Image: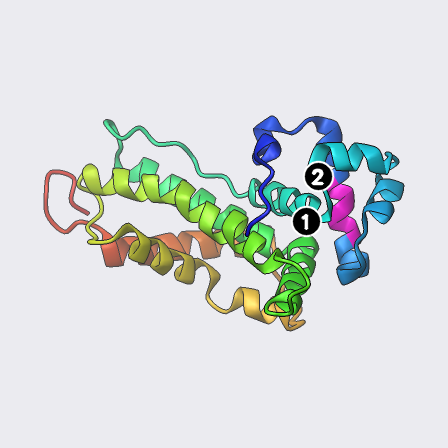
Protein backbone atom coordinates (compact mmCIF):
# COMPACT_ATOMS: atom_id res chain seq x y z
CA UNK A 1 0.00 0.00 0.00
CA UNK A 2 1.30 3.46 -0.86
CA UNK A 3 2.28 5.69 2.01
CA UNK A 4 0.82 9.08 1.14
CA UNK A 5 1.25 12.25 3.17
CA UNK A 6 -1.91 14.19 2.25
CA UNK A 7 -1.12 17.26 4.36
CA UNK A 8 2.04 18.13 2.44
CA UNK A 9 1.62 16.64 -0.99
CA UNK A 10 2.21 19.85 -2.95
CA UNK A 11 4.70 22.69 -2.83
CA UNK A 12 1.90 25.12 -1.93
CA UNK A 13 1.24 23.40 1.39
CA UNK A 14 4.86 23.08 2.45
CA UNK A 15 6.40 25.66 4.74
CA UNK A 16 9.82 27.07 3.88
CA UNK A 17 11.27 25.07 6.77
CA UNK A 18 9.75 21.83 5.46
CA UNK A 19 11.14 22.56 2.00
CA UNK A 20 14.59 23.05 3.51
CA UNK A 21 14.30 19.70 5.31
CA UNK A 22 13.28 17.92 2.10
CA UNK A 23 16.15 19.55 0.22
CA UNK A 24 18.45 18.23 2.94
CA UNK A 25 16.98 14.75 2.46
CA UNK A 26 17.55 15.00 -1.30
CA UNK A 27 21.20 15.97 -0.79
CA UNK A 28 21.66 13.01 1.53
CA UNK A 29 20.17 10.70 -1.09
CA UNK A 30 22.81 11.91 -3.54
CA UNK A 31 25.58 11.32 -0.99
CA UNK A 32 24.39 8.16 0.77
CA UNK A 33 21.71 6.61 -1.42
CA UNK A 34 20.13 3.64 0.31
CA UNK A 35 21.58 4.60 3.71
CA UNK A 36 19.19 7.54 4.26
CA UNK A 37 17.90 7.56 7.85
CA UNK A 38 15.69 9.86 9.89
CA UNK A 39 18.65 10.49 12.20
CA UNK A 40 20.88 11.56 9.31
CA UNK A 41 18.20 13.88 7.88
CA UNK A 42 17.56 15.43 11.30
CA UNK A 43 21.27 16.05 11.75
CA UNK A 44 21.74 17.52 8.26
CA UNK A 45 18.62 19.72 8.52
CA UNK A 46 19.38 20.80 12.11
CA UNK A 47 16.03 19.64 13.45
CA UNK A 48 14.83 16.96 15.84
CA UNK A 49 13.69 13.48 14.84
CA UNK A 50 10.48 14.24 16.71
CA UNK A 51 9.81 17.08 14.27
CA UNK A 52 10.42 14.78 11.30
CA UNK A 53 8.02 12.18 12.67
CA UNK A 54 5.41 14.87 13.34
CA UNK A 55 5.63 16.23 9.80
CA UNK A 56 6.19 13.08 7.76
CA UNK A 57 5.12 10.13 9.90
CA UNK A 58 8.11 7.83 9.32
CA UNK A 59 10.91 7.14 6.83
CA UNK A 60 8.47 6.06 4.11
CA UNK A 61 6.46 9.23 4.68
CA UNK A 62 9.63 11.32 4.43
CA UNK A 63 10.59 9.60 1.17
CA UNK A 64 7.08 10.15 -0.20
CA UNK A 65 7.18 13.85 0.65
CA UNK A 66 10.66 14.08 -0.88
CA UNK A 67 9.43 12.58 -4.15
CA UNK A 68 6.40 14.90 -4.16
CA UNK A 69 8.60 17.93 -3.54
CA UNK A 70 10.92 16.98 -6.39
CA UNK A 71 7.98 16.34 -8.76
CA UNK A 72 6.39 19.69 -7.87
CA UNK A 73 9.29 21.40 -9.66
CA UNK A 74 7.77 20.26 -12.96
CA UNK A 75 5.22 22.97 -13.60
CA UNK A 76 2.20 22.80 -15.85
CA UNK A 77 1.25 26.22 -17.10
CA UNK A 78 -2.51 26.75 -16.64
CA UNK A 79 -4.55 27.22 -19.79
CA UNK A 80 -7.90 28.82 -20.40
CA UNK A 81 -9.98 26.14 -22.05
CA UNK A 82 -12.42 28.63 -23.55
CA UNK A 83 -9.83 30.94 -25.04
CA UNK A 84 -7.06 28.45 -25.67
CA UNK A 85 -5.02 29.04 -28.80
CA UNK A 86 -2.09 27.25 -30.36
CA UNK A 87 0.47 29.63 -28.90
CA UNK A 88 -0.74 29.09 -25.33
CA UNK A 89 -0.91 25.33 -25.76
CA UNK A 90 2.57 25.20 -27.25
CA UNK A 91 3.98 27.34 -24.42
CA UNK A 92 2.41 25.10 -21.77
CA UNK A 93 3.81 21.93 -23.34
CA UNK A 94 7.27 23.45 -23.81
CA UNK A 95 7.39 24.61 -20.18
CA UNK A 96 6.39 21.16 -18.94
CA UNK A 97 9.01 19.49 -21.14
CA UNK A 98 11.75 21.90 -20.08
CA UNK A 99 10.99 21.58 -16.37
CA UNK A 100 10.79 17.80 -16.56
CA UNK A 101 14.15 17.51 -18.34
CA UNK A 102 15.75 19.76 -15.71
CA UNK A 103 14.33 17.65 -12.90
CA UNK A 104 15.23 14.20 -14.25
CA UNK A 105 18.76 15.33 -15.12
CA UNK A 106 19.46 16.67 -11.63
CA UNK A 107 21.76 14.74 -9.30
CA UNK A 108 18.94 14.43 -6.77
CA UNK A 109 16.49 12.80 -9.17
CA UNK A 110 19.13 10.44 -10.51
CA UNK A 111 20.02 9.34 -6.97
CA UNK A 112 16.37 8.98 -5.98
CA UNK A 113 15.54 6.88 -9.03
CA UNK A 114 18.59 4.67 -8.56
CA UNK A 115 17.50 3.88 -5.00
CA UNK A 116 13.91 3.24 -6.16
CA UNK A 117 15.08 0.90 -8.95
CA UNK A 118 17.34 -0.92 -6.51
CA UNK A 119 14.42 -1.47 -4.13
CA UNK A 120 11.95 -2.61 -6.78
CA UNK A 121 10.78 -6.10 -5.96
CA UNK A 122 13.16 -6.40 -3.01
CA UNK A 123 10.50 -6.10 -0.32
CA UNK A 124 12.54 -3.43 1.47
CA UNK A 125 9.92 -0.71 1.09
CA UNK A 126 7.55 0.70 -1.51
CA UNK A 127 9.79 3.50 -2.80
CA UNK A 128 9.40 2.37 -6.41
CA UNK A 129 5.62 2.61 -6.15
CA UNK A 130 5.95 5.97 -4.37
CA UNK A 131 8.13 7.34 -7.17
CA UNK A 132 5.66 6.14 -9.81
CA UNK A 133 2.57 7.42 -8.00
CA UNK A 134 3.95 10.81 -7.03
CA UNK A 135 6.23 11.26 -10.03
CA UNK A 136 5.20 9.95 -13.42
CA UNK A 137 1.53 9.25 -12.58
CA UNK A 138 1.10 12.60 -10.78
CA UNK A 139 2.58 14.44 -13.75
CA UNK A 140 0.13 12.65 -16.05
CA UNK A 141 -2.78 13.79 -13.90
CA UNK A 142 -1.54 17.36 -14.14
CA UNK A 143 -0.83 17.46 -17.88
CA UNK A 144 -3.79 15.48 -19.20
CA UNK A 145 -6.27 18.32 -18.50
CA UNK A 146 -4.11 20.55 -20.74
CA UNK A 147 -4.22 17.93 -23.49
CA UNK A 148 -7.98 17.55 -23.07
CA UNK A 149 -8.40 21.32 -23.25
CA UNK A 150 -6.42 21.32 -26.48
CA UNK A 151 -8.69 18.64 -27.91
CA UNK A 152 -11.84 20.50 -26.87
CA UNK A 153 -10.49 23.67 -28.48
CA UNK A 154 -9.99 21.82 -31.75
CA UNK A 155 -6.20 22.06 -31.56
CA UNK A 156 -5.42 18.42 -30.82
CA UNK A 157 -6.85 15.20 -32.18
CA UNK A 158 -6.39 12.00 -30.16
CA UNK A 159 -8.58 9.15 -29.02
CA UNK A 160 -7.06 8.52 -25.62
CA UNK A 161 -5.41 11.07 -23.30
CA UNK A 162 -3.17 8.46 -21.64
CA UNK A 163 -1.80 7.38 -25.01
CA UNK A 164 -1.22 10.99 -26.02
CA UNK A 165 0.54 11.72 -22.72
CA UNK A 166 2.79 8.67 -23.03
CA UNK A 167 3.76 9.72 -26.54
CA UNK A 168 4.66 13.23 -25.38
CA UNK A 169 6.57 11.83 -22.41
CA UNK A 170 8.55 9.60 -24.75
CA UNK A 171 9.33 12.44 -27.16
CA UNK A 172 10.63 14.55 -24.28
CA UNK A 173 12.64 11.87 -22.47
CA UNK A 174 13.94 9.80 -25.39
CA UNK A 175 16.83 7.78 -23.87
CA UNK A 176 17.97 10.58 -21.56
CA UNK A 177 16.78 9.16 -18.23
CA UNK A 178 18.10 5.64 -18.72
CA UNK A 179 21.49 6.95 -19.89
CA UNK A 180 21.74 9.19 -16.83
CA UNK A 181 20.80 6.31 -14.52
CA UNK A 182 23.55 4.22 -16.09
CA UNK A 183 26.15 6.92 -15.49
CA UNK A 184 26.35 8.63 -18.87
CA UNK A 185 27.47 12.24 -18.34
CA UNK A 186 25.18 14.03 -20.76
CA UNK A 187 25.75 17.75 -21.24
CA UNK A 188 22.25 19.09 -20.60
CA UNK A 189 22.69 22.86 -20.63
CA UNK A 190 19.85 25.37 -20.43
CA UNK A 191 20.12 25.83 -24.18
CA UNK A 192 20.10 22.08 -24.85
CA UNK A 193 17.09 21.52 -22.61
CA UNK A 194 15.23 24.44 -24.16
CA UNK A 195 15.92 23.13 -27.65
CA UNK A 196 14.83 19.62 -26.71
CA UNK A 197 11.60 20.95 -25.19
CA UNK A 198 10.79 22.86 -28.38
CA UNK A 199 11.64 19.86 -30.55
CA UNK A 200 9.50 17.45 -28.51
CA UNK A 201 6.54 19.84 -28.60
CA UNK A 202 6.85 20.33 -32.35
CA UNK A 203 6.95 16.58 -32.91
CA UNK A 204 3.96 16.02 -30.63
CA UNK A 205 1.92 18.67 -32.44
CA UNK A 206 2.90 17.15 -35.78
CA UNK A 207 1.50 13.82 -34.57
CA UNK A 208 -1.60 15.01 -32.72
CA UNK A 209 -2.33 18.46 -34.08
CA UNK A 210 -5.85 18.75 -35.50
CA UNK A 211 -5.64 18.87 -39.27
CA UNK A 212 -9.05 20.47 -39.80
CA UNK A 213 -11.36 22.85 -37.97
CA UNK A 214 -11.44 26.56 -37.26
CA UNK A 215 -8.11 26.44 -35.41
CA UNK A 216 -6.51 23.59 -37.31
CA UNK A 217 -2.71 23.46 -37.35
Circle 1/circle 2 CB separation < 8 Å:
yes
- Disc 1 to disc 2, how far (Cα)? 8 Å
Other-residue count near label 1 (Cα within 10 Å), few / some / many at <14 / 14–19 / ≥20: some
The picture places residue 77, in percent across and down from the top left corner, at: 43, 35
Compared to residue 41, the image places residue 180 above or below, namely below
Residue 5 screen position, x and y as percent: 60, 38
Q: Which residue is mark 1?
A: 60
The type of colouring in the image is: rainbow
Which residue is more in the foreground, 160 or 73? 160
55 within the magenta span: no
80, above or below 98, in the image: above
Q: Which residues are magenta?
A: 22-28
> Which sits in the foreground, 182 or 89?
182
Q: Nearer the viewer, residue 71 or 191?
A: 71
Q: Is residue 154 left or right of residue 53?
A: left
Residue drawn at (57%, 36%) of the image: 9
SS for callout 1 = helix
Rendered location of residue 186, percent (x, y): 62, 66
Q: Which mark is residue 57?
A: 2
Seen from the viewer's position, the closer of residues 82 and 61 is 61
Amino acid sequence: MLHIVPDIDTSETLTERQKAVLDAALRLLVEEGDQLTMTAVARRASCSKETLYKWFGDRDGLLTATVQWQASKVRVAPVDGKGLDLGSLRASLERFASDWLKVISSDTSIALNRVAVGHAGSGKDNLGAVVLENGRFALARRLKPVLEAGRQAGLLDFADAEMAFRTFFGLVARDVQIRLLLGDRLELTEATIGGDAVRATQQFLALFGAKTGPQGL
